[in-house]
Image: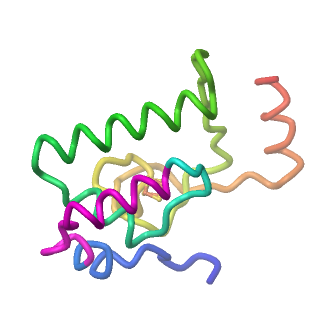
Amino acid sequence: MRNQNFIDRDKLYGMLENNAPSESQLNDILNKARKLKGLNLEDVAKLLSVEDEAGIQKILDTAEYCKDDIYGRRLVLFAPIYTGNACVNNCVYCGFRKDAPMPPRTRRAAPSAASTSSWHL
Ligand code: SF4
C-alpha cells in the first residue's frame, strides 16, 4: 500500500452521482452527526449531494452544533507540518501532486521531521 495512490477517484465520483438523500435519510445522517461519533463515506457523499436550501441549512445548523460541542467558543487553528514534497496522488489544487512540475522530490527521515516539528511547539 505504501507509495500507492490510495484515493479511488472513480469510486468517489460514482458515490456523488444520483445520491441525494431523502428528507428522512438526511435527518438520520444529521442525527448521527450530532452524536459526535463520526460519519462514514456514504453519509458524507449523501450530504455533498444535497442541493436544496432547506437541506443545506440543516447541514449548516448541524455543523455549528458539532463545532460548538467539540470546540466551544474558541478559535482553533491547525498547521500542517510537511515532512516531504513527494505524493502519489494528483489532487488538482495541490502543488505537491505527482504531476506538478517541481525540483526533485524529497522525504524527510523521522528524526529530521521530529526536529522540524519541535520548532512549531
Ligand atoms: S492534497 Fe496534495 S499532498 Fe495531499 S494527497 Fe492531494 S496531491 Fe497529495
| Snapshot quadrant of residue 41 | bottom left
x%, y% of residue 48? 26, 57
Identify which residue, 109 or 50, lies in the foreground.
50
x%, y% of residue 27? 33, 57
Q: Residue at x 38, y 79 (%)?
A: 8
**Quadrant occupied by the N terminus:** bottom right
**Quarter containing ligand 1?**
bottom left
Identify which residue, 51 or 77, lies in the foreground.
51
Q: Residue at x 76, y 24 (%)?
A: 120
Q: Residue at x 31, y 81 (%)?
A: 11
Q: Is residue 67 above or below residue 22?
A: above
Identify which residue, 34 or 114, lies in the foreground.
34
Residue 23 falls within the magenta-colored stretch: yes
Identify which residue, 51 or 25, lies in the foreground.
25
x%, y% of residue 109? 80, 55
Q: Is residue 73 above or below residue 36?
A: above
Q: Residue at x 39, y 46 (%)?
A: 95
Q: Which residues are magenta?
A: 15-33
Q: How is the image coloured?
A: rainbow
**Quadrant occupied by the C terminus:** top right
Q: Tell me: 37 left or right of 21.
A: right
Q: Tell me: 21 left or right of 72.
A: left
- Count the numbered circles shown: 0
User: Could you tell me what secondary structure mostly forms the magenta stretch?
Assistant: helix
Residue 38 falls within the magenta-colored stretch: no
| Snapshot quadrant of residue 69 | top right
Extreme front residue here?
24
x%, y% of residue 86? 55, 59
